[in-house]
Image: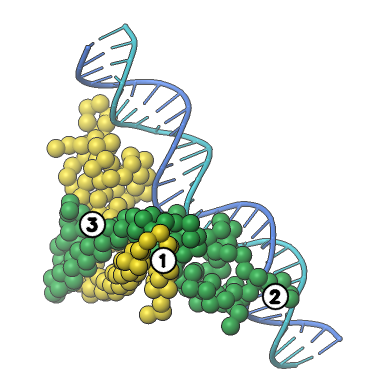
Chain colours: A yellow, B green, C cyan, D blue
Amino acid sequence: MPLRRGELARRAGCNIETVRYYERIGLMPNPPRSENGFRSYEERHLTRLTFIRRARELGFTLEEVQDLLRLVDGGHYTCAQVQELALRHTDDIQRKINDLHRMQRALKEMSAQCSGEEVPKCPIIEILSETS
Amino acid sequence: MPLRRGELARRAGCNIETVRYYERIGLMPNPPRSENGFRSYEERHLTRLTFIRRARELGFTLEEVQDLLRLVDGGHYTCAQVQELALRHTDDIQRKINDLHRMQRALKEMSAQCSGEEVPKCPIIEILSETS
DNA sequence: GTAGCCCCTGTAGCTACTACAGGATCAAGA
DNA sequence: TCTTGATCCTGTAGTAGCTACAGGGGCTAC
């Protein structure tokens, strides 16, 4: 199932210029070309691109994504380094999960308070800005 | 406890230019000035700024943050609109939580596979790029 | 053979910051 | 009192991560 760039982008839910940009900065590999010079992508490209997009939506920087991807690409990591990297990221991720849960609760609370035509008092800011 | 800009930024964990930028685009209000012309911030500014920063780290765009903040600022929403907005965001948030959980699991699995000096096979990409 | 859709490359614009320059203000110490 | 250092002010320019558009070419289908 070789894909062209447009189809790859469509399946990953991003636009074609983004793919191009990732290739330019080396985050995605340059794929082989077919006869006519069009780029030809495989399943693994889609997998990788999808991963990058999801990670970006979760607030990771491209540098952090690069970091995670090197775990896959490189193989020049020692076991200890992998664990350290993984641990650092799991802490970060846990913090994000906690924040999202609080936000979730706040939004639910808010929409539950909705009755009639009045605008309810909004707890969302207070909840997400709690220090902890 | 009136704060100056630098202290406000420090407490919210961002840098001073970011505060300035948010004020320029109207996401943060222009605070009153003290005698000497320095900006003077209150607790509520810190709360708001902290909220914005957290939301940004969670991958929300400034436009989405703006959207959420209008729930607090405005009061020109009907109850139905609030609920619709809240619902839309809770779906989005739930998706993010799910993705983060998967990523979390993958990282833990990976670091558990670590034994000796070998670099383990990395399940992280496959897991986060699953379609669902 | 030409219309429509997708590909190619290059370049410019946008969002969300971030950094730096050049000068003023203020508290603390010599 | 004068200086040193930290902070403030304003303006402007640069960076990261896309996004849009221009100008041209290749396929397929009528």
Which of the 4 quarters of the picture holds residue B93? bottom left
Task: Tell me if residue B88 can be seen.
Answer: yes
Horizontal and vertical percent for residue D19?
Answer: 41, 42
How busy is the neighbourhood of tag 2: few (under 14 within 10 Å), some, or many (20 plus)?
A: few
**What SS does tag 2 mark?**
loop
Q: Which mark is residue A120?
A: 1
In this view, the mark in front (3 or 1)? 1
Residue for point 17% across, 51% down: B131
Q: Which mark is residue B34?
A: 2
In this view, the mark in front (2 or 3)? 2
Task: Tell me if residue A88 can be seen.
Answer: no
Q: Quadrant of the N terminus of chain A?
A: top left
Disc with the residue nearer the chain's start (3 vs 1): 3
Q: Chain of mark 1?
A: A
Residue for point 56% across, 56% down: B25
Q: Are marks 3 and 1 on the same chain?
A: yes
Q: CA distance from mark 2 to mark 1?
A: 34 Å
Residue for point 20% across, 54% down: B129
Left or right: B114, with D15 as reference point: left
Which of the 4 quarters of the picture holds residue A75? bottom left
Q: CA distance from mark 2 to mark 3?
A: 55 Å
What kind of residue is marked 3?
Answer: Asp
Q: Looking at the image, which is closer to me, D29 or D25?
A: D29
**What SS does tag 1 mark?**
loop
Which of the 4 quarters of the picture holds residue B113? bottom left
Residue ID for mark 3: A73
Horizontal and vertical percent for residue B76?
Answer: 48, 57
What kind of residue is marked 1?
Answer: Pro
Q: Which mark is residue B56?
A: none
What kind of residue is marked 2?
Answer: Ser
